Image (cartoon, helix red, strand yellow):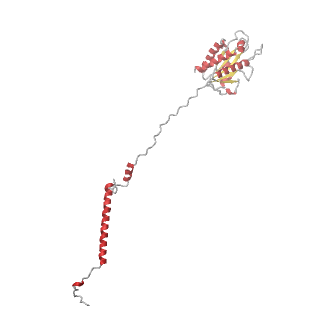
Amino acid sequence: MSYDRFEPMPRGRRRRRPRGGLRRHILEAIAHGFLAFSLAVNLLVLVLFFWVWPGASSSASTPPSTPLVIVSAYTPTPAYPPTPLPTATPLPTPTPHVPRIGIIAGHWQNDSGAICEDTGLQEVDITLAVSRKIVAQLRSEGYQADLLAEFDPLLNGYQADALVSVHVDSCVTFEGATGFKVARAATSVIPETEDRLVACLYDAYERATGLPRHPGSITHNMTGYHAFYRIHPQTPAAIIELGFLYHDRDMLTNEQDRLATGIVNGIKCFLDSQ
């Protein structure tokens, strides 16, 4: 049946909307609703985040260096072990000085010295025996003692607390040739020190032996004694003539311990006076 294009359709024949279009509108409405719900949830989470988390709301406007300050404020200071106090180093105990004494046995390893024609007694026999006793006594009392020959190489620049050269006077027979004498270098660089050594030897030897002093017979051979000018100039030195070979012979040969003790005591007197 054909109808004119301007003729209205019959009432009972209205056009129906297809079912597929309705379904599509429903799905679109659901999708829009889900999107709106998701957006609302995300917005809520974001608000809660900024409200609950400390400092999160200001992090966007804080300069880049601020987080470092905040982190360091919450970082605990590391605990370092205490610096140990410096321990005082004990000073070394000073080694006590042990005095050193040189004893020259006059004429030993050089010549005989004075000789008595009546008996053949030689000066070196007495000087060596007495010098050995002096050294033995000094060592037994804890001193360092050197037994030296007349021209011992050790005398060159020898340094000690004292040096004594032991000699015996000539074997002359004239009356009054008895006694002992002590001298130091005429040109000493330490005259006061050596004068004390000479004085101590005079006093101690006189008390030990009872022999008289005989200073009037001191010669240049004593004050210009060669060893005085070979040893170190700061080494105090003296020369002693123990007695005369003729009139003092008995003591020189038979009482040598007394002679040695007198010299040892004189050296100790000098060392104690320093």
Q: Is residue 270 above or below residue 83?
A: above
Image quadrant where residue 159 sits: top right
| Figure check: 40 above or below 247 | below
Viewport quadrant of the N terminus: bottom left
* Camera-side residue of 219 and 81: 81
Extreme residue toward the top, this view:
175
Q: Is residue 244 visible?
A: no
Nearest to the observer: residue 174 or residue 101: 101
Q: Position of residue 158 (x, y in %)?
A: 65, 27
Residue shown at 31% from the left, 67% from the top: 34
Query: How many marks overall?
Result: 0
Q: Quadrant of residue 256?
A: top right
User: Quadrant of the rendered structure where residue 175 is?
Assistant: top right
Q: Is residue 51 left or right of residue 210?
A: left
Residue plotted at (38% across, 49% down): 74
Residue 77 left/right relative to 20:
right
Looking at the image, residue 40 lies above or below residue 185: below
Residue at the far front: name it.
Answer: 12
- Residue 48: image location, x then y, percent: 31, 57
**Looking at the figure, which quarter contains the C terminus?**
top right
Q: Position of residue 106 (x, y in %)?
A: 70, 20
Residue 156, position in %: x, y?
A: 67, 27
Point 73% across, 18% down: residue: 125
Most foreground residue, 237 or 43: 43
Would residue 71 be seen by someone viewing this image from the given angle? yes
Q: Nearer the viewer, residue 83 or 39?
A: 39
